[in-house]
């Protein structure tokens, strides 16, 4: 190959790289725009509720009971908006790269703590833990892994209407360990088991009917991957099974 051909080939390759980078940048920009649009849409609902209730409180002649009802509505919608903002900020941290405060801990303690928290928050939910008798030492950011488990158990609670059964089990495999969270809810169709990890994606009301914004699963996956693991939705004949691998 002569020098002219070599230069032409190199220029073609450089041009292909530039075009590929431009396409990737445009795709990333479109994803960002769609994400911001969806986030604004999610925030609009609680903000509109707060504004309407506050306007009625200021302008209308209400009795004590009506004022109390509207004030409660303001508090609930403000909490909903706050949770969404916290999730959006957490998603931004995941995108930038999480700073993990790793420490050697017994994974069983994290599971026990989150199971007990869920029992208090969802008193109608039956939660069972299945764990080895021996300690399960892992080097993780305890608070972040607790957040993942909290998201998975809360998702299971929503799927069962807060009245179903949830099992949280630990399965050690050599240098790896899995935590599986299963429920007896309606399950997740095979075609949606990966899509649910996209941002602001929610399925039918049976699995998303309690006001979740669709950020819990992508945040959980981001935290798990920052640890070198992952979160997946496994194939299941009954209910749904989510797996945290560390």
Image (cartoon, rainbow, N blue to C red):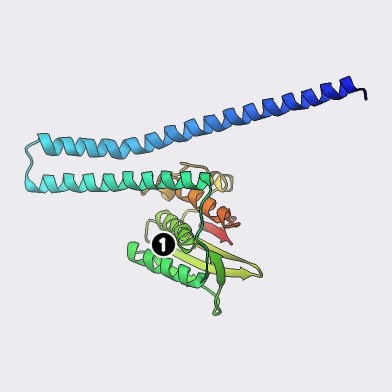
Q: Nearer the viewer, residue 163 or 39?
A: 39
Q: Residue at x 58, y 48 (%)?
A: 190
Q: Residue at x 83, y 21 (%)?
A: 8
Q: Which residue is drawn at 37% across and 38% down?
A: 42
Image spot of residue 134 (x, y percent): 56, 79
Q: Quadrant of residue 157?
A: bottom left
User: Which quadrant is home to the C terminus?
Assistant: bottom right
Image spot of residue 14 (x, y percent): 74, 26
Q: Residue at x 33, y 66 (%)?
A: 120
Q: Which of 211 and 40 is in front in this view?
A: 40
Q: In the displayed structure, does residue 231 sit left or right of residue 153?
A: right
Q: In the displayed structure, does residue 51 sit left or right of residue 221?
A: left
Image spot of residue 65 (x, y percent): 10, 48
> Is residue 48 shown to the viewer in this render?
yes
| Residue topped by disc 1 | 164
Q: How many labels does the image show?
A: 1
Compared with 67, 234 (above or below) is below
Compared with 144, 134 (above or below) is below
Image spot of residue 152 (x, y percent): 47, 57
Q: Quadrant of residue 156?
A: bottom left
């Amino acid at each position: 190959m002569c020098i002219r051909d070599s230069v032409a080939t190199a220029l073609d390759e450089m041009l292909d790289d530039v075009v590929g980078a431009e396409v990737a940048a445009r795709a990333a920009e479109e994803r960002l725009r769609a994400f911001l649009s969806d986030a604004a849409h999610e925030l609009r609902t609680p903000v509109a509720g707060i504004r309407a209730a506050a306007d009625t409180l200021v302008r209308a002649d209400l009795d004590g009971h009506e004022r109390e009802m509207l004030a409660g509505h303001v508090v609930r919608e403000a909490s909903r908006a706050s949770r969404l903002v916290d999730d959006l900020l957490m998603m931004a941290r995941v995108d930038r790269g999480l700073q993990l405060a790793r420490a050697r801990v017994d994974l069983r303690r994290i599971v026990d703590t989150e199971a007990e928290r869920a029992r208090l928050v969802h008193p109608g939910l039956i939660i069972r833990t299945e764990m080895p008798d021996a300690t399960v030492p892992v080097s993780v950011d305890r608070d972040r892994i607790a957040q993942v488990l909290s998201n998975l158990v809360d998702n299971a609670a929503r799927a069962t209407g807060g009245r179903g059964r949830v099992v949280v089990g630990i399965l050690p495999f050599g240098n790896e360990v899995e935590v599986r969270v299963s429920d007896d809810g309606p399950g997740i169709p095979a075609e949606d088991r990966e899509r649910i990890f996209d941002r602001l994606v929610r399925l039918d009301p049976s699995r998303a009917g309690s006001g979740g914004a669709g950020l819990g699963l992508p945040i959980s996956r981001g935290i798990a991957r920052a640890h070198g693991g992952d979160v997946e939705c496994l194939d299941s004949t009954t209910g749904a099974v989510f797996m945290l691998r560390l």
